[in-house]
Image (cartoon, rainbow, N blue to C red):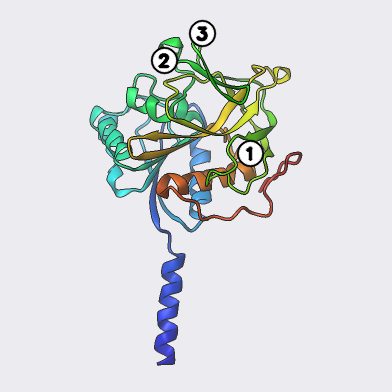
Amino acid sequence: MVRFTAFLLLLAAVAAAAPKHKLLIIDGQNNHAWQQTTPVLKRLLEETGLFVVDVATTPPKGGDLSVFKPDFARYRVVVSNYNGEPWPPKTKLAFEKFVESGGGFVSYHAADNAFPEWTAYNRMIALGGWAQRTEKDGPYAKFRDGRIVLDNKPGPGGHHGKRHQFQLVLRDTAHPITKGMPAQWMHNTDELYDSLRGPAQDIHLLATAFSDPATNGTGDHELILFTVKYGKGRIFHTTLGHDVEAMRSVGFIVTLQRGAEWAATGKVTQKLPADFPTATAVSVR
């Protein structure tokens, strides 16, 4: 009887430790080094113990994208590390249905450069850059005087200055993703995206960073971390993580991990680690 009880306890422990959510990372085309960053994304997400992670890699640029048909319905959340040629119409529709029906989506760094022509995708990410985005694609979004300000002036969407360490300022300290974090914390050397523009609808702002003119920035606080609601789906949009060095930032790691869990479930169970950065000091792993 004692052995049987111990066996049941062991089974319960294994079940409790088992990953709970299937997660899909999409890569294959990008103007960034996806071959280096996807393995890091996969490792960081798996180490939470919350996810079973698969990777779907598209054909290379100029290849036959008609064969790219992930079964999104098998997953709880999709993380995009993709910035390339348009997906087939059926794949796009399947992804729209997935998110609209309640699937989670994490837009990671240059994923917000992708698909300027795809209306639903741009609603999901709310703000994008580059790919010839202009005022035709929606307003700029800035954080000024304690609120998001939409600016319809003409100009290209998407820019960043010199890579550097910078401070993030939380604009919602009670959200599950940011709860418990210091109100300001330092991020490792990275691109600070600015001048993003798009539909800018249903944004819930989590954190901004000051785009310093001294680093060729805009002089505005730019939207860096935010969530978006699309149908029943939850989207976490992070502009951080240009390369493997930037991904060493504990702030990036924790917001990615928490953002993915929130996108999957609407909740965050992960505790804030002891090595989380402070307002004045970067923390890396």
Q: Residue type at mark 3?
A: Lys
Badge 1 vs badge 2, beta-carbon distance below 8 Å = no
The residue positioned farthest toward the right in the image shown: 280
Label annotation for residue 153: 3
**Residue beneath the point at 64% across and 29% down:** 209
Front residue of 82/119: it is 119
The residues bearing labels 1 and 3 have C-alpha atoms spaced at a distance of 35 Å
Front residue of 219/132: it is 219
* 260 lies above or below 129: below
The residues bearing labels 1 and 2 have C-alpha atoms spaced at a distance of 32 Å
Q: Residues within 10 Å of mark 1 (few under 14, many from 20)?
A: some
Which SS class for mark 1? loop
The picture places residue 284, in percent across and down from the top left corner, at 68, 45
The picture places residue 87, in percent across and down from the top left corner, at 31, 28
The residue positioned farthest toward the left in the image shown: 90
Residue 116 appears in which quarter of the rendering? top left
Q: Residue type at mark 1?
A: Glu
Which SS class for mark 2? helix
For marks 1 and 2 on the same chain, the one whose residue lies earlier in the sequence: 2
Badge 1 vs badge 3, beta-carbon distance below 8 Å = no
Q: Which of marks 1 and 2 is in front?
A: 2
Residue at mark 2: 137
The residue positioned farthest toward the bottom in the image shown: 1
Answer with left or right where residue 34 lies relative to residue 94.
right
Label annotation for residue 232: none
**Residue beneath the point at 47% across and 23% down:** 128
The picture places residue 129, in percent across and down from the top left corner, at 49, 20
Q: Residues within 10 Å of mark 2 (few under 14, many from 20)?
A: many
Badge 3 vs badge 2, beta-carbon distance below 8 Å = no
Q: Which of marks 3 and 2 is in front?
A: 3
